[in-house]
Image (cartoon, rainbow, N blue to C red):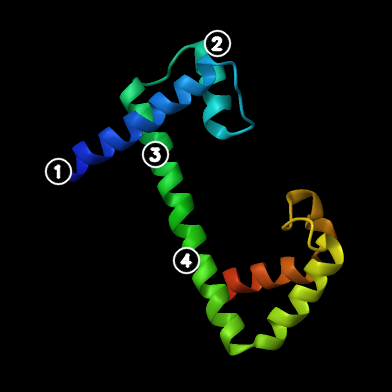
């Protein structure tokens, strides 16, 4: 199977899963649900195939950039373990062991925020 057919199959299957979830009345606060709601209300600006591929490419792009950034931070922590230790202290202070950092914790984690930004500056994706 060529790459195009493989991706069409993958994104078509993903879309079918999303449609099955939505058929049960389950909506999520995510780009695909927002766009599907908008397009169902106002019409489709392109084909269903095009929509599936657009959503798939957005997902792929986000996954690649996230993975690249995580690798950069792992490398930075290996070179500077004291930075990781200081970040861990800040995370433990804000989140304890109850949960991983959430978006609602963002403003209470300035050191971790600075580390992420420095990783993007140091090795942009």
What x and y, as percent, mark residue 15?
40, 27
Is label 1 in a helix, a strand or a loop? loop
Q: Which residue is mark 3?
A: 56
Q: Which residue is mark 4?
A: 68
Residue at 74 percent across and 52 percent down: it is 102
Given residues 46 and 107, the one toward you in this image is 107
Task: Using the image, tell me which numbered label, if any, was put on residue 2.
Answer: 1
Is label 4 in a helix, a strand or a loop? helix
Quadrant location, the N terminus: top left
Residue at 64 percent across and 32 percent down: it is 29
Marks 4 and 3 sit apart, C-alpha to C-alpha, by 18 Å
18 vs 8, left or right, is right
Is label 2 in a helix, a strand or a loop? helix
Q: Which residue is mark 2?
A: 41
Can see residue 124?
A: no
Given residues 71 and 114, the one toward you in this image is 71
């Amino acid at each position: 199977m060529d790459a195009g057919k493989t991706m069409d199959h993958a994104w078509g299957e993903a879309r079918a899963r999303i449609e099955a979830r939505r058929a049960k009345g389950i909506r999520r606060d995510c780009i695909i649900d927002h766009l599907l709601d908008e397009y169902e209300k106002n019409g489709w600006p392109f084909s269903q195939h095009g929509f599936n591929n657009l959503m798939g490419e957005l997902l792929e792009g986000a996954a690649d950039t996230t993975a690249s950034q995580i690798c950069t931070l792992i490398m930075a922590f290996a070179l500077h373990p004291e930075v990781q230790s200081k970040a861990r202290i800040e995370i433990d202070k804000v989140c304890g062991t109850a949960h991983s950092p959430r978006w609602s914790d963002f403003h209470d984690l300035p050191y971790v925020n600075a580390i992420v930004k420095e990783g993007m500056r140091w090795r942009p994706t």
